[in-house]
Amino acid sequence: MSAMITLKNVSKWYGDFQVLTDCSTAVEKGEVVVVCGPSGSGKSTLIKTVNALEPFQKGEIIVDGMSVGDPKTDLPKLRARIGMVFQNFELFPHLSITENLTIAQERVLGRSKDEARQKGLHYLDRVGLKAHAAKFPGQLSGGQQQRVAIARALSMDPIAMLFDEPTSALDPEMVNEVLDVMVELAHEGMTMMCVTHEMGFARKVANRVIFMDKGAIVEDCAKEEFFGDIKARSERAQHFLSKILQH
Amino acid sequence: MMGFDFSQIGPALPGLMDGMVLTLKLLLLAVSGGVALGTVLALMRLSSNRLLSGGAKFYVNYFRSIPLLLVITWFYFVVPLIFKWISGEFVAVGAFTSCLVAFMMFEAAYYAEIVRAGVQSISKGQLNAAYALGMTYGQAMRLIILPQAFRKMMPLLLQQSIILFQDTSLVYAVGLMDFLNTARSKGDIVGQPNEFLILAGVVYFVISFGASTVVKRLQKRLAV
C-alpha cells in the first residue's frame, strides 16, 4: 500500500541558503506524525511544502497519488483535499464564523448554501462552538478561533490534516481545548502531520515522531522508540528534549 | 470700495444645478473606473511576472509625473483617434467622454498605489489560508484579500476622490460645462463674475470640507 503523503529527498533553498536538506519520510493513512525540533529547523517550511504553500527545488512529494511539484498538478484541487491549520489561526476577519466555514465549501467544492451550512455547523458543534456561529472571529478568544479553524478545515472533508504549530500562539490556558480536539481527531483515524512542541500530545496520540535540525530530518522513529530510551537518541535530539521535557 | 450684488444668482440656480450634476456624474464615473483600473494595476504591480509588474510600474510613474491638465487636453484630441482606430470609423466622442477617460486613466495611477499598499497590509497568512482551502489566486483576491484591503484603505480612497472632485474643474480647458465653468460663464453674462465665483468657492469648500470631515470620522472609527 502506498502512503498518503510521501516525501523523497526534498530540498529547498532561499537564494544560497539551504532551508531543507534531503528530507524523506512518509505518512500512512490514519497515521499521526509529530514533527518537532528547535526553531529555525525548517519544520514549518517542510509541512508547507506538502500542500505547495512553499515551493521546493529538489526531490518529490506525492500526496494521495498526486505529485505536488509537478507543474501540471492542479494545486487548488490538491489543496482542497488537505486541511491545514496555522499558528495564527488565519480565520477571515471580515466574514462571520458561519461564512468562514462555508465560503470554500461553496466556492471551491461547489456545494449548495444549505449543504455547506449544515456541514459547517456540524463541525462547529463538534468543536463545541455552535453558539458562536453568528459572531465574527475578532469576538472569539485565541483558543476558540483555532477550534473554528480546525472546523473550517474539516468541513472540506480532507483526506489528511496538516497542523503548523497550532498551539504556539495561544495563551497557556487555551492550549488544552485545542489539543483535546486534535486528540479526538487522531482517535477517529484522521491522517495527521503536526508540527508542535507539545510532547504530551505526541506521547498520547502520535504513531511516529520526526525530529528536525538545521533543515534535515535527524530522527524519524516510532513514538515508543523516540520517548523510550532518550539516551539512544542523537545528541541534538537529546539536547532539544532535555530543554523541553524538564518541566 | 466695490459693492457685491448677488441678485442674479437666484435665476441662475437651475443652470448651476445642471453644472453640478455634470460634475458629480463625472466624479462618480471617474472614481468607479479609476478604482477598477487602479486595482488591476495594483495586482499587476504585485505580480511576480516582471513584464506585468514593470508595465504597471511604468504606467503609474508616468501618469504621476505629468500634469492632469495636460492629460485632459491631450485626451481630448487622442481619444477620438483611438475610438476610430478601434472601430474603424470616425465616432464623435465628445468632451465628456474624453474627460472621463482622462480622469479614469490619470486617477488610476493614484488609486493603484493606494490599493497596492492596502493589499500589502493584509498578512501573507491570509493568502496562505485561502490557498490551503483550495482557492485560486483570483478567488483568494476577490473573496479574501481585496475585501479586507478595501475596508482598510477606504479613508484614503475617499480622500483621493475629494481631491478629484476639485480637479474635475479642469475640464473648463476643453469647454465642458461643469459647475465651475457654468458659474463663470453665467457670471460673465450677467456682469457679476466676482459674485458667481465667490458662490462657486463657497460650494466647493462646503462639499469638500464636509466630505473630508466625514472621512476623518470614518478613519477614527476604523482605527479602533
Image (cartoon, rainbow, N blue to C red):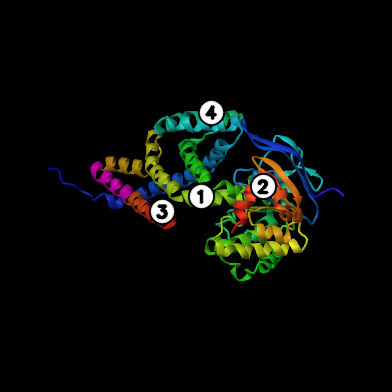
Q: Amino acid at mark 2?
A: Ala
Q: Are marks 2 and 4 on the same chain?
A: no
Judged by depth in the image, the label closer to the viewer, 2 or 4, is 2
For the residues bearing labels 2 and 4, Cβ distance under 8 angstroms: no
Q: Which element is circle 2 on? A: helix
Towards the viewer: A151 or A102: A151
Residue corresponding to mark 1: B150
Residue B51 coordinates in the image, percent (x, y): 60, 29
Mark 3 Cα within 10 Å, few/some/many (few <14, many 20+)?
some
Residue corresponding to mark 4: B81
Q: Amino acid at mark 4?
A: Leu
Task: Check the residue under mark 2 and report the chain it is in.
Answer: A
Q: Residue at x 74, y 47 (%)?
A: A220
Q: Amino acid at mark 3?
A: Gln
- Res B167 quadrant in image: top left
Residue corresponding to mark 2: A237
Task: Check the residue under mark 4 and report the chain it is in.
Answer: B
Q: Which element is circle 3 on? A: helix
Q: Which element is circle 1 on? A: helix
Q: Residue furthest left?
A: B1
The question of residue A77 being in magenta is answered with: no
Q: Are marks 1 and 4 on the same chain?
A: yes
Quarter of the image for the N terminus of chain B: give it.
Answer: top left
Q: Which residues are magenta?
A: B192-205
Q: Amino acid at mark 1?
A: Phe
Principal SS element in the magenta part?
helix
